[in-house]
Amino acid sequence: MAMVTPIRILCFGASITAGWNQLGLRYYPYSSTLEARLKEALPTIHFSVQVDGLPGDTVIHGQYSKRLHSLISTATTAYDWIIIQGGGNDLLSCREPRVIFSALKEIWSIAFHAGSRVVALTVTKTVGESDGLARRYDALNELIVSEEHEKFYSIDVSNMLPPATMDNIMVSKIYDRDGIHLGKQGYEMMGDAIASSLVELIRREPHGENTGDFQNRSDTHHFNISNSKPHPHEASTRIGN
């Protein structure tokens, strides 16, 4: 019986990817929910999910590029999908959205050159942000979801989550008490949303049963899956071409 090659997924980013909670005393990475949902939806496919989240890291003058290069160069098998979230710490450091976006594109290109598909996540917002910061969040997220590349996909997790309010900290526990990170429920919602979109993408990009490669299909990069009012456990997905 031939050995089945798993679909390899890397969840890459900063503290949100790591699942930072309660000042780093607890971690609830969304990858745990993502992996469970993928296995439930696609039980005949084997998945290998890896997490690399560095709290505080920035895409501008940070360690993103170095970390990703290292992970790709030391991987025994190429990653099929690299889920990348970045830019939140840069926004909080008063960096401009277009400068952050340029840095993100350079990071995405590292994955492209390694033969991986990129799933870019929008940046989750913070509680009590100023109008100016809110506009910068919106500007960066709009740039992310408007990007187009044959190996590029995006999931708007920012709009998937309920508003960043005090009620969603104290009552719903969706956000952490620091108003920046998520609570356990928030990370689970994030994992659910990413999974629902990634399942759809994997079904459209069937994994080669013998070679482990994705089969070429001309129609898979020329459509959008979007919903202006996403379900709490779903997110809108854009597929670039």
Image (cartoon, helix red, strand yellow):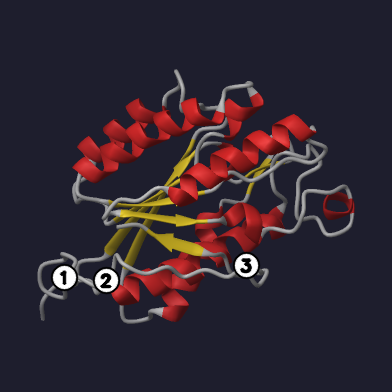
**Disc 2 and disc 1: Cα gap in Å?**
7 Å
Residue at 53 percent of width and 34 percent of height: 87
Residue at 27 percent of width and 37 percent of height: 110
Q: Relative to 149, is 191 on the left or the right? A: right
Q: Mark 3 highlights which residue?
A: 228
**Disc 1 and disc 3: Cα gap in Å?**
31 Å
Inspect the image, locate mark 2, and give the three-letter code of the amino acid beneath it.
Glu
User: Which residue is nearer to you in this view: 170 or 32?
Assistant: 170
Q: Mark 2 highlights which residue?
A: 205
Which of discs 2 and 3 lies nearer the camera? The answer is 3
User: Which residue is nearer to you in this view: 28 or 241?
Assistant: 241
Quarter location, residue 157: bottom right
Quarter location, residue 89: top right
Q: Position of residue 31 (x, y in %)?
A: 50, 56
Which secondary structure lies at badge 2?
loop
- The number of numbered badges drawn on the structure is 3
Which of discs 1 and 3 lies nearer the camera? The answer is 3
**Disc 2 and disc 3: Cα gap in Å?**
25 Å
Residue at 35 percent of width and 51 percent of height: 148
